[in-house]
Image (spheres, rainbow, N blue to C red):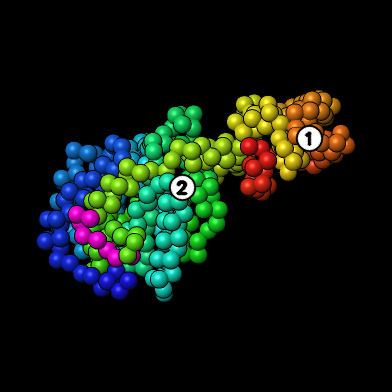
Amino acid sequence: MNSLVEQKTDINGHLSRVRKFYKKWFKGKFTGSRSYGNPAQRLVSPNQVDEMIQTIKRTNGQCPQYMSVNYKILYDGKIIVEKIEKLFLDFDSPSDLKTAYRDVLDAYNIVKSLGAEPLIVFSGSKGYHLYVWLPDPLKMRDFKVFTYPTFLVKAEIWIKTLYNVLFEKYFDTLDKVVLEPQRISRIPYTIHQKTRNIVAVLDPETGEKVDVEKGIELLEYSVNNPLPKEVLDEVWLDYSFKIVRPRGFRKRKYTTNRMPFLLKYVFDNGVGIGARNNAAFALALFFKLRGRSKSEVYNILFEWNMKNRPPLPEREIQSVVKSVYTHHYKYFLSKEKLEREWLDGVL
């Protein structure tokens, strides 16, 4: 572990060996432009990568070298995310680097157990970065939205949902601020301007920094072994069942009549023991918020209850409907996060 913070490098000699890595890091799994800066960001297209590398060569070791985690475009005069390529996690522990390493290795092993191959990068100073690639880019059309600002709001909720599905806990050294799509991160195989350490890819087996050739190999392996689609199916299930008020939309009411996917599944198929009351509450509130009367909702839930395994006693349905119409609930399931037992009962 000591070599992680002691290794230094000659700037010019170092850059002559990492040109290939920079190009692969820029391209990633898909195609598109990214933002680059030291640290002020500017948009760089694929045909400007050589120009970016020249800038790195000229300024490396003198100032930070950052690149956007995801693909970006210029929208309304601002650089904004166009496609989500990967999940980025930042583990920092200024007083104890070993604590951050323990957390990033724990996260690495969890993701690896799901069938993906994350990439660990030493930040050059007080922590580690973990990158987890997606099998397909996440775009506006995946959220059925038509403006990039709305896409950003939806994508941030989705990224946090992805994190919760993967880990179900927050690590002590995790920087939670990075769980949003606009993030930038230090480019591997550049030099930290303060410590003079290399920002380098780590071998997860040994915890040691690897040379550029091995770094390219590990990068390609991670890009080609993204999260399985089965994992993302669970993320979309969890995401689609959330009705939330994103930042900037606090006073706007949720008015769509479309039933979220998971709720429709519940409505069509019923649920088992452990999920029936929560499901009844969610359905009752959904119909109440769309203008149905108390008696209408009771009749709807009475028929739906026949699909449950086994059906709830009739008095339970009456109690749920009474509670929903007595209290001023605004958004179902925004009060607390879905419990794992609830999803188990549904599926």
The magenta stretch is 207-214
Query: Picture quarter containing residue 77?
Result: top left
Q: What residue type is disc 1 on?
A: Pro
Q: Which mark is residue 229?
A: none
The N terminus lies in which quarter of the figure?
bottom left
From mark 2 to mark 1, how far is it between C-alphas? 33 Å
Residue 279 figure quarter: top right
Question: Measuring 43% from the left and 32% from the top, which residue is drawn there?
Answer: 140
Type of amino acid under label 2: Leu
- Other residues around mark 2 within 10 Å, as few (<14) / some (14–19) / many (≥20): some
In the rendered image, residue 98, in percent from the top left (x then y), is placed at 40, 71
| Placement of 99 over or under 154, stated as above or below | below
Element marked by disc 2? loop
Q: Which residue was labeled with disc 2?
A: 114
Identify the residue shown where x is 38% and y is 55%: 130
Which residue in the structure is indicated by mark 1? 310
- The secondary structure that dominates the magenta segment is loop
